[in-house]
Structure formats: structure tokens, C-alpha cells
Amino acid sequence: MVALLLAFPLSTVLFFLSSSADSVREAERSKTLAVTSVDEIRQAARAIATRSRKVFGPRLVVLRVASPVWRDAVGELASLSSLPLIDISELTENVLWELQELIRRFGDKCVLIGRYESVTALATPPSAAHAGTSVERRAAALLADRDVLAYTTDPAGLKRFARALRALLLTRGA
């Protein structure tokens, strides 16, 4: 009888722990999604929004998007976002388009990050000998008055970056 009395309160705890573990596993599985059509983008966006409200929901999701629909994906996800974050470390025409689109939609709420070496190269005025690529020149002009949070990949640098990013997200999200 005593064993049954002890088992009842413990079963609640075990059920909670089991349920939590299932939630964590589901969040891990849903971190990466692949989409190939506009309909799949909309479904993925709804799923991401739903999952992010859960206690153990993913806070960062990688969306692998087929080339013909990547602009649609940016637009759909931007419409659900309250605070976009974009890494400008590897500038391409596509990243420049995304940067322009997110700045147009969100203005100063857009959080810009980049590898330290890439960010300093953009911030350094080009010399006459090296004028940079067209993408670099246009990005530098677009970023002229904007803050970009730079990171390094060493452990201490990543720790500093994480603290600075957390603070920036809290202030811009307010």
C-alpha cells in the first residue's frame, strides 16, 4: 500500500519528465526544414510560428529553400518576424537583396551580424588600388550608418558575442 502511495506522486513527475523529453526531441527534429514551393513555405512558416510558442520549441530554425522560391521564403518569414537577424559575413547578390528587403521592412529593428574580418573590411574605406566588388560597395553604402555586431569564432569571442547579441535582442525587441 505504501508503495502505491509513493508511486502516485512519482508517476506525475515521471510523466512530466517523459513529456518534457519528448518535447525537447521534437524541438530538435524541427530545427531544419526543406521547402521547394511557395505552398511549402507557407506551411513551414505556420509550423515555425506554432512551434516557437511551445516551451521547448526551437528558437532558431534553418530553412533550406529551393532557389526559385527563396525570395518568397524571405518575404513570408519576414511577415512573421518581429525582429529579423541577418548575417552579412558572406556577401552575395542574394544576401544584399535580403539585407535591402529586411532594412526596408524593419528599419533599425533589423539586427545585423557578421564575422569580424568581413565587417571590418566593409567598414574600411576602399583604397584606389582595391575598390571592392559591386556587392561590397553597395553593402557598404547601405550599412554606412548602421550598427553591425561582429563576432570571432574563438571560444572567448563567441562568449562575448552571445552576451552582446542577447543584450541587443532584448533592447531592440522592447
Image (spheres, grey):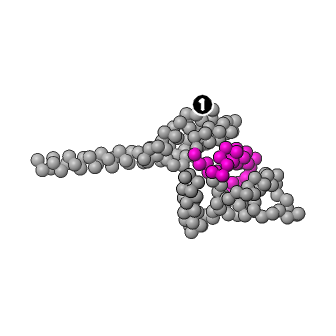
Toward the right, the furthest residue is 128
Furthest toward the left, the residue is: 1
Question: Outermost residue toward the front?
Answer: 174
* Image height of 161 relative to 109, above or below: below
Q: Is residue 96 highlighted in magenta?
A: yes
**Residue 30 in sight here:** yes
Q: Position of residue 14 (x, y in %)?
A: 28, 48
Picture coordinates of residue 37 (x, y %)? Answer: 63, 32
The residue tagged 1 is 39
**Other-residue count near label 1 (Cα within 10 Å), few / some / many at <14 / 14–19 / ≥20:** few
Q: Residue at x 59, y 67 (%)?
A: 157
Which span of residues is magenta-colored? 82-110
**Residue 159, position as x, y percentages in the image:** 55, 65
Residue drawn at the location 67% of the way across and 59% of the way down: 148
Label 1 amino acid?
Asp
Q: Can residue 25 be seen at all in this image of the molecule?
A: no
Pick the front one: 144 or 27: 144
Residue sticking out furthest to the top: 39
Disc 1 on helix, strand or loop? helix
Q: Residue at x 72, y 64 (%)?
A: 120
Give coordinates of residue 152: x percent, y percent: 63, 64
Task: State yes or no: residue 22 in magenta.
Answer: no
User: Which is more toward the observer, 111 or 94?
Assistant: 111
Q: Is residue 60 left or right of residue 22?
A: right
Above or below, comparing residue 114 to residue 56 in the picture? below
Horizontal side of residue 48 vs 16, given as left or right: right
Above or below: residue 63 compared with residue 112? above
Q: Which quarter of the picture shows residue 156?
A: bottom right
Against 83, residue 132 (above or below) is: below
